[in-house]
Image (cartoon, rainbow, N blue to C red):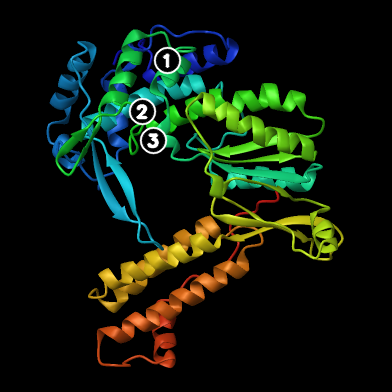
Amino acid sequence: MYRNEESVNTKLQRIAERASRDKRCQFNSLFHLMNKELLLECFTQLRENAASGIDNITKVKYASELDANLTDLIERLHKMAYKPKPVLRVYIPKPGSHKQRPLGIPALEDKLVQAGLVKILQRIYEQDFISDSYGFRPERGCHDALRALSHTVEGQPIHYIVEADIKGFFDNVDQEQLMAFISHRIADKRVLRYIKRFLKAGIQEDGEYKGSERGVPQGGTISPLLANIYLHYTLDLWFEKRVKSSCYGYARIIRYADDYVACFQQETDAKRFMEEMEQRLKKFHLEVAPEKTKLLEFGFFAQSKAKARGERAETFDFLGFTHYCSRSKYGNRFRMKRKTASKRFTAKLAAYKEWLRANRILPTAEILKKTVQKLRGHIAYYGVTDNSKSLSCFIYEVRKLLFKWLNRRGKRRCYNWEKLLKLLSLYPLPTPRIVVNLLSF
């Protein structure tokens, strides 16, 4: 690359600045950024051990002739000769239930092209998305959404919560509506055509091809961004511009992908939102999941009101945690606390039990090392403010499962608790601890 030639990242930054300055700007010249520099960067960021799609090409295999492969891919892209392959759909067990979870695996070059498109589109849409959209965005995550929720409920006059989840969201996105939304910002016909090709690529399951007239390709790198764009126009902007302006009291929505909660000061505002939300989503061929959607009294007065009725204050689940009304350590102020949701707790234990069953022939040291890794991952997510009791319970249950399955490997009752504790002194399990403070930014 010549010294006076701008890098792709510099060009992308200029696009982001322009998108930020002019919210009505349509970008009609973007596809030239899909060059070798960008796709090489995307390739290096692919996971080494990622499963292959219907092309059976792994990252290692593609890397054996990387320069030639990228040159050929770019040539096909710019000739509009590149056609995405169907997503390979496989099913994996869903821990804690007898159901199976569908998993989509795109072909390797599809992953590359989608990643390149995401890098370009993200620079534009990151300037548009509202601050309370947290799912699948750079430098944002579940803990940020939970922290925002804590500050809202504890720091604002919140008395009602609407907990909502969209039923089968990724399978029911209206593709024509999605393309219309994207066209508000993107006027580059080649970018639009390739997005549409990915949407129409279809699914291959058990050797049979299935068309995709609705939804976005689950498992695709571009799917989370497309989902955010769709919900930005159908839900976020509507809430910010219409719902909030008609509310009599404070209102805020906090969304992570298709899972969201809306916080209200006034009951009338919350009830109207519930009614209008269903109608709003219906316009875009979406509907809420009834079993995961409810309006509840929550906040400073919820406990006393529930107690007067002889009831307990209601709780709600969000991002794997059950949120409940409580008080501060000395009881002088309201606190919203949280614990691991029972369904998640059970599912995580079931997943660990299944892993033990499948890997019981591994050496004991290896089982313990892997268990430590799994627990560290669990603590990294669930080790949040107020959740120490659930963490301790989870580690205790893991220790019991270890005891049970290690005893099944050798002679009957070859382990007692004393022997297990001695073994765990050599490979100590992580201590339950709070690693994420949700009370401070």
Q: Nearer the viewer, residue 3 or 33?
A: 33
The answer for how far apart the CA atoms under marks 1 and 2 are is: 34 Å
Front of the two marks 1 and 3: 3
Q: Nearer the viewer, residue 225 or 44?
A: 225
Mark 1 — residue?
11
- Quadrant of image for the C terminus: top right
Q: Are marks 3 and 2 in contact (CB under 8 Å)?
A: yes
Local SS, label 1: helix
Question: In the displayed structure, would residue 28 be above or below residue 39?
Answer: above
Residue at position x 65%, y 54% in the image: 437
Question: In the displayed structure, would residue 175 be above or below residue 422?
Answer: above
Mark 3 — residue?
171
Who comes first in sequence, dot 1 or dot 2?
1
Residue type (three-letter) at the residue carrying disc 3: Asp
Residue type (three-letter) at the residue carrying disc 1: Lys
Residue at position x 53%, y 11% in the image: 18
Question: In the displayed structure, would residue 425 be above or below residue 304?
Answer: below
Mark 2 — residue?
214
Q: Quadrant of residue 31?
A: top left
